[in-house]
Amino acid sequence: MSRGIEIAVFVALALSIHVMLFGLRPTGGVEAGGVDGDATISIEGATSAITEMVEQWERPVPQIPQPTNAPFLPDPLESLQPPNLELPEAPRADLKIAALPTLEPDELSLDIPQPPPPPTEPQFEVEEAATQQPDPLSPPPKRGLSELAPESSPRPSERPERRVKKEPEPQPEAAEKADQPSAGRAAQKAAGTGGGAQAGNSGSAQTTTASTGKQKELEAIWGAKIRSRIERAKRYPRGAREPGQVSLTISIGSDGRLLAVNVVRSSGNLELDQAAVAAVRRASRFPAAPRGLAGDSFTFSLSVMLQRN
């Protein structure tokens, strides 16, 4: 309730203030200073040039009289047609030719030397038989002997002498050596009881050759197994940075024991050489020698390649 009373009081107070201010405003206007003239505002007069320009602007535009009759326009189709021109008739050519005077043959003759007559070529008589074509089914005619070739050549009066080839004379030293008989050489026999021309007993050479080939084959098979076991036992050293190849010789007994290992060619890096030897020692015990391979110990040469995987 008090809130509404306050609003009404403030509104009445504002209205009273506005009424007081409206009553205090001046009733007359402010007068400007003049120059002792009769007009309210001073205006400067225009020059003669401006006056003429204004008169030209205010002058009405002169009207151009419109033509009462429409201009004559030619027909476009008639203008496109070609004009009829009367050309004179051209003179005929036969009339001009007839008008030329005819000249006598005596007047046209000129003193031109005549060329000499061409030399006459000798005429050959051609036999009628040559012009006739032979029948293709008839057999060819037999040619007779030429009149130029004689039936028999004249026999020479004397036979030419036969040239005898001279043989070189034998040297006296070669003749003396040929006269002397060569000394004989004592006969010799191959050793053995097989009856052949080469030394050896009956059948022993073939057996020895076959057993040697078998030994090589068994040794190669055993060496491949040993190499595969060494390859699985390789370890690349941690301190090495570059790969290397080490050549080794190993001696192995027939029972598979490692007897010796030696470095034949170094890789240039001590760590790689030691790693190759350690791989061989790590791979033993090796498989035993296969049956049929004779011997107590065997030596193998192999190259071990060490590189970072």
Image (cartoon, helix red, strand yellow):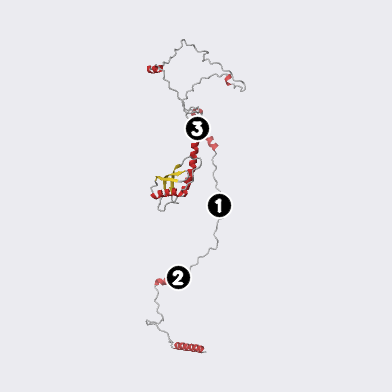
Q: Could you say which quadrant of the image residue 21 lies in?
A: bottom left
Q: Which mark is residue 57?
A: 2
Foreground mark, 3 or 1, reads: 3
Q: Secondary structure at mark 3?
A: helix
Residue 273: where, in percent of width, then height?
A: 40, 48
Marks 2 & 3, CB-CB < 8 Å contact: no
Circle count:
3
Q: Is residue 145 above or below residue 74?
A: above
Q: Which mark is residue 233?
A: none
**Mark 3, residues whose alpha carbon is within 10 Å: few (<14), some, or many (≥20)?**
few
Disc 2 from disc 3: Cα separation:
153 Å
For the point 54% across and 38% down, the residue is 93
Q: Which mark is residue 80?
A: 1
Marks 2 & 1, CB-CB < 8 Å contact: no
Residue under label 3? 204
Residue 223: where, in percent of width, then height?
A: 47, 43
